[in-house]
Image: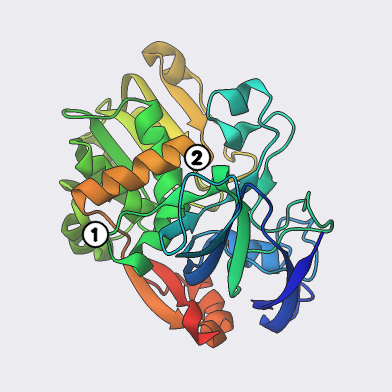
Amino acid sequence: MNTTLVKAFGTEAATADLKELNINRREVTATDIEIEILYCGVCHSDLHTARNDWGGTLYPSVPGHEIVGRVTKIGSEVTKLKVGDLAGVGCLVGSCSTCDSCKNDLEQYCSNGWVGTYNGADQYIGGHTFGGYSEKIVVDEHFVLTIPTNLNLAAVAPLLCAGITTWSPLKHWNVGKGSKVAVVGLGGLGHMAIKLAKGLGAEVTLFSRTLDKVQDAKDLGADTVIISTDENQMATVSGKFDLIIDTVPTIHDINPYVAALAVSGTLVLVGYLGPLDPFLNSVPMILGRKSVAGSLIGGIAETQEMLDFCGANNIVSEIEIIKMQDINEAYERMINSDVKYRFVIDMTTL
């Protein structure tokens, strides 16, 4: 298959800074769309992959799975978009399409393994996939998303990961008008959970460990902020919430939040991967038919639904735009939670 050399930004080792390098992109096939990348959001997964925090990173690594841009070329069988249209690519660029999950628009749970936008198996030219820290990307049309034209394009980018990661559980657990939803943690995921839950008509509460997030949370749409380190405040919300979205990315005690669930309520983990410690107390779960669950991103249809909803309700992420050359500094700032609430790279600076 023919390929084209493309300028990108990536790293060749876990301990090395990201720098300019060249990668190969395939020429469009009959069902492919080529996108000139205009903006790319910066996700914690980018940092973890670049630094091999989770193990298994393939180098050179080019992160980026919150991609928005403009269509520059389409294959002969493409019907979804045309040259000149705005387009997006999220965390997925491939799946088997034949398993039960794929047939039910749940590509993120593909039984045979979905293909990540970066660090996945490249089924076309071999090797591994490269992400959005690059000039352009070529993706099968099924995995390309339509972008609402009324929204700030840069601020749309984080919707393709942070947005869909919080939208998917909101939809799965049928959040709507009158639902009581709480969010644990106010960061890239948490701020989108507040905006989307509020957009769906829910009564929204933020759990925060400190007072410094109170005004920000209310500005984003939260009705109430509960300081989770204050036992008296926590007692006021015992048995209250239908759904709690826990966005904290590090190990922490979830038992106090389970106590805040209503009968048949669910706490869904979207930020932390790994064993829970201290151990989960099953007593309140059994006595109140409460659940602790996990959720990944969404499938392509669900992601498009989220984008359309955001377009109709003028919902985007809160962002800070950076130059491509500032990515290493941005990673350090992310580690220190020094961003409100998502970095987005202006890819014209590459």
Q: Is residue 267 above or below residue 337?
A: above
Left or right for 55, reference 104: right
| Circle 2: element type | helix
Q: Are marks 1 and 2 in contact (CB under 8 Å)?
A: no
How many numbered marks are there? 2
Left or right for 309, reference 313: right
Q: Is residue 77 visible?
A: yes
x 57%, y 39%: residue: 278
Measured in 3D between alpha carbons, the distance from the residue under mark 1 to the one under mark 2, in whole angstroms, is 21 Å
x 49%, y 43%: residue: 270
Q: Residue furthest front?
A: 76
Q: Is residue 128 above or below residue 283?
A: below
Q: Is residue 225 visible?
A: no
According to the picture, the residue beneath numbered tag 1 turns out to be: 150
Q: Which residue is at the front of the view, 21 or 163?
A: 21
Give percent across and percent down for residue 219.
17, 60
x 53%, y 82%: residue: 324
Give percent across and percent down for residue 313.
20, 48
Kind of residue at badge 1: Asn
Q: How is the image coloured?
A: rainbow
Q: Is residue 7 above or below residue 213?
A: below
According to the picture, the residue beneath numbered tag 2 turns out to be: 300
First along the sequence among labels 1 and 2: 1
Give percent across and percent down for residue 48.
64, 62
Q: Which residue is at the front of the view, 194 or 273?
A: 194
Task: Pick the quarter of the image with the N terminus.
Answer: bottom right
Kind of residue at badge 2: Ile
Give percent across and percent down for residue 136.
59, 70
